[in-house]
């Protein structure tokens, strides 16, 4: 494909710096030159896209993705989909993320053992469209906690979206199995969750012996660990065992925050606020009205999560958007609502919210030296946005506002050649 020059763009580079007008040249899959003002870069032999002042920003990263969640009303419904349909479903969800501007996603657990790896491999092989993807294991859990959906009279492990282990040796076997399948990240459910009867968000489930074995086996293979950790003890347990990606971290105390601050350059937190906020305020869709949501503990958890995230941000911990989209109350595709939640609840500026899904996104993808910024030499994952997300962060929820979506130097969505907003000029033959 020909090289591409975006000209007449307002550049948000992802570092948090003030936007500026300029031009960006893409050669192959990389950003090779950036110019300030107009007509600063050569146009010979390149496709020129005159964006008429539209915003060019790095592609966004979703830090807690489940391609395998099926937009269901309940957790146990996820596993009712047979393997074949589930694979097709996950493939179309992967495309949906790219359609909505998420050019990178971090897999946070998959409901069938190999599903995430299969989808990642198909994306990388060019068989299906999708974001850059780090594939996850199933959520490894213990009997009775989040992810164990077995019924007493139907003892079939396949009914659970989690992989249920009990004891260190059972953990070792599970972790080795997922590493054999090729996951990038092992997920452990350390705390409970308010959706699970008898295992609410503040309860703790996994023993230190079990977590230690998982950490050892994962690190031996050079892979990464993530935790579902809503309770204050589970956050500390994550820190004790060197877990780098902490999902939720709603409840924290001073000791836990100190431990996080000590590892702030290594760790990432994705609170997944959608579950709490949507169930609390819009849960009617799944027959959870406000009083039921409050009884389940969501009012208390929201207050704690907001306090925890603000404290983490103050201490320099990276807090990223994304989390548990793929339920009836928050279906896939609505993920950019998290950016609005960050502004509304956590007190981030829109620019800080954009940094959290771009610069920090490249970092959680373990590609911080080449992904997540508009910078010379970086990979060309770019969004051309009709409007200004700094003055209105809400527009990033609207896929129609993306005039162009580029991943790895290739258009997933090319600008319309006859659009009123952009003008594309092909190079002379
Ligand atoms: Zn999740």
Image: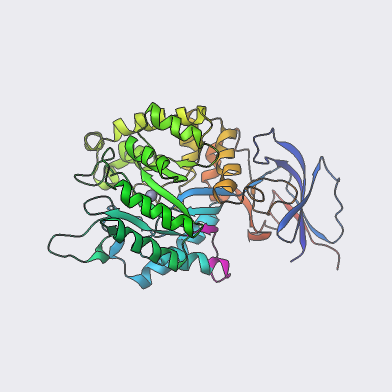
Q: Residue 8's image quarter?
A: top right
Query: Is residue 243 at all visible to an observer of this figure?
Result: yes
338 versus 1 height, above or below: above
Quadrant of image for the C terminus = bottom right
Residue 152, given in percent of the width and then of the height, sits at 13, 60
Q: Quadrant of the N terminus?
A: bottom right
Q: Relative to residue 188, is residue 101 drawn left or right?
A: right
> Where is residue 151 drawn, in percent x and y?
17, 60
Rendering quarter of residue 86? bottom left
The single residue placed furthest to the left in the displayed view is 153
Magenta highlight: main SS: loop
Residue at left offset 65%, top offset 59%: 408
Rendering coords of residue 204 (x, y %):
27, 42
- Horizontal relation, residue 28 to residue 230: left or right: right
Which residue: 37% across, 35% down? 250
Along the viewing direction, whichever of 146 and 6 lies nearer the viewer: 146
Reply above or below: 16 against 90.
above
Q: Is residue 67 left or right of residue 356?
A: left
Q: What are the residue bounds of the magenta stretch?
A: 123-135
Seen at 27% across and 58% down, the residue is 164
């Amino acid at each position: 494909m020909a090289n591409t020059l975006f000209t007449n763009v307002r550049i948000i580079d992802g570092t948090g710096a003030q936007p500026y007008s300029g031009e960006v040249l893409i050669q192959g899959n990389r950003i090779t030159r950036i110019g300030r003002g107009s007509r600063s870069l050569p146009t010979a032999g390149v496709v020129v896209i005159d964006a008429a002042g539209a915003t060019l920003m790095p592609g966004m990263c979703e830090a807690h993705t489940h391609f395998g969640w099926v937009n269901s009303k309940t957790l146990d419904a996820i596993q009712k989909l047979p393997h074949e349909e589930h694979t097709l479903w996950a493939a179309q969800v992967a495309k949906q993320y790219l359609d909505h501007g998420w050019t990178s996603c971090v897999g946070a657990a998959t409901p069938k053992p190999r599903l995430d790896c299969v989808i990642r491999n198909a994306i990388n092989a060019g068989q299906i469209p999708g974001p850059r993807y780090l594939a996850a294991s199933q959520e490894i859990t213990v009997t009775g906690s989040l992810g164990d959906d077995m019924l007493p009279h139907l003892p079939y492990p396949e009914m659970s979206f989690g992989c249920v282990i009990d004891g260190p040796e059972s953990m070792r076997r599970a972790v080795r199995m997922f590493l054999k399948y090729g996951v990038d990240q092992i997920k452990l459910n350390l705390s409970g969750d308010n959706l699970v009867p008898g295992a609410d968000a503040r309860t703790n489930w996994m023993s230190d012996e079990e977590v230690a074995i998982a950490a050892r086996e994962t690190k031996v293979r050079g892979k990464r660990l993530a935790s579902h950790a809503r309770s204050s003890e589970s956050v500390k347990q994550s820190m004790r065992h060197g877990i780098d990606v902490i999902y939720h971290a709603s409840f924290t105390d001073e000791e836990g925050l100190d431990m996080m601050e000590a590892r702030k350059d290594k760790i990432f937190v994705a609170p997944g606020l959608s579950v709490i906020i949507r169930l609390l305020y819009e849960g009617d869709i799944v027959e959870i009205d406000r009083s039921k949501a409050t009884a389940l503990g969501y009012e208390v958890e929201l207050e704690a999560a907001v306090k925890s995230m603000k404290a983490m941000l103050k201490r320099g911990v990276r807090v990223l958007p994304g989390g548990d989209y793929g339920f009836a109350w928050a279906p896939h595709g609505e993920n950019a609502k998290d950016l609005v939640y960050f502004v509304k609840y956590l007190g981030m500026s829109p620019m800080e919210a954009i940094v959290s899904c771009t610069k920090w996104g490249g970092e959680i993808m373990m590609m911080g030296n080449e992904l997540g910024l508009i910078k010379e030499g970086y990979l060309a994952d770019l969004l051309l946005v009709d409007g200004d997300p700094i003055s209105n962060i809400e527009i990033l929820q609207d896929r129609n506002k993306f005039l162009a979506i580029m991943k790895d130097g290739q258009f997933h969505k090319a600008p319309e050649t006859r659009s009123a907003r952009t003008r594309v000029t092909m190079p002379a033959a």
